[in-house]
Image: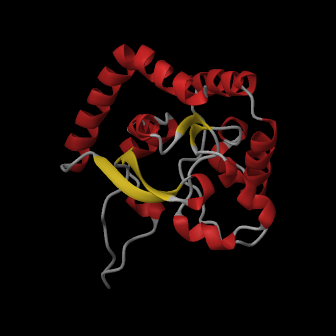
């Protein structure tokens, strides 16, 4: 049922999302002067890897020794705006259509984090990752990793179509008034 609703919602919103994606792709292409879509491996349901699509938001700048600069130095002002408004996430609608993701669920994280999870934290992988989720409407990148995992696991244990509807509605509201830190620290496995 959830898969049917995901596809139905995407198809219904195509008249809005497709032009926005096109304009965002054009903006990113002009800004970075390269292909606008960035691909990265992420962990899906049960830790299975998949390729996640996003609009590019970082440069490939290196320091004098040839090492990639930290994220904060590679994120441009335009890219910060894309992240705050979550427009950089729109290509993940393709991931939803492919079945890698769903509209609502815990955000997909990097595969190298899998070995760092506690049994409690690993529960977040019992469902497909989502474009938005319970942790995203409760602070997104401004909350600690432990709080994020608590919220993700709570969602897994209480998921329902009513909860998904509420998360979707809150996400739309938050996109209209972005006030979030566009960068997230790396997860080290240490409880914070």
Quarter of the image holding residue 106?
top right
**Farthest-out residue, bottom:** 65
> In screen coordinates, is 181 left or right of 155?
left
Image x and y of residue 86, in percent:
49, 36
**Farthest-out residue, front:** 1
Nearest the viewer among 67 and 15 is 15
Residue 97 visible in the picture: yes
Q: Which colour scheme is used?
A: secondary structure
Q: In this view, does 180 lie above or below 117?
A: above
Q: In which quarter of the image is the N terminus?
A: top right
Q: Is residue 13 above or below residue 25?
A: above
Report the number of numbered marks: 0
Quarter of the image holding residue 113?
bottom right
Image x and y of residue 188, in percent:
66, 72
Nearest the viewer among 19 and 156 is 156
Q: In this view, does 88 lie above or below 116?
A: above
Q: Residue at x 60, y 41 (%)?
A: 180
Q: Residue at x 74, y 55 (%)?
A: 123
Image x and y of residue 71, in percent:
46, 62
Nearest the viewer among 79 and 146 is 146
Image x and y of residue 43, in percent:
54, 58
Quarter of the image holding residue 60?
bottom left
> In screen coordinates, is 33 left or right of 172?
left
Q: In which quarter of the image is the C terminus?
A: bottom right
Q: Residue at x 53, y 62 (%)?
A: 110
> In screen coordinates, is 119 left or right of 90?
right
Q: Which residue is drawn at 57% across and 40% down?
A: 130
Residue 144 visible in the picture: no
């Amino acid at each position: 049922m959830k898969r049917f609703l995901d596809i139905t919602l995407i198809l219904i919103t195509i008249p809005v999302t497709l032009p926005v994606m096109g304009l965002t792709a054009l903006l990113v292409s002009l800004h970075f002067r390269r292909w606008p879509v960035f691909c990265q491996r992420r962990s899906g349901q049960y830790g299975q890897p998949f390729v996640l699509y996003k609009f590019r938001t970082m440069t490939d700048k290196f320091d004098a020794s040839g090492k990639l600069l930290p994220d904060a130095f590679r994120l441009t002002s335009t890219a910060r705006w894309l992240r705050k408004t979550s427009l950089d996430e729109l290509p993940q609608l393709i991931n939803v259509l492919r079945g890698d993701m769903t509209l609502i669920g815990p955000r997909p994280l990097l595969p190298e984090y899998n070995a760092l999870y506690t049994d409690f934290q690993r529960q977040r992988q019992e469902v497909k990752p989502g474009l938005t989720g319970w942790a995203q409407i409760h602070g997104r990148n401004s909350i600690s990793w432990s709080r994020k995992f608590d919220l993700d696991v709570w969602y897994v244990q209480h998921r329902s179509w009513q909860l998904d509807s509420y998360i979707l509605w809150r996400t739309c509201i938050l996109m209209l008034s972005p006030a979030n830190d566009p960068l997230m620290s790396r997860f080290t496995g240490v409880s914070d």
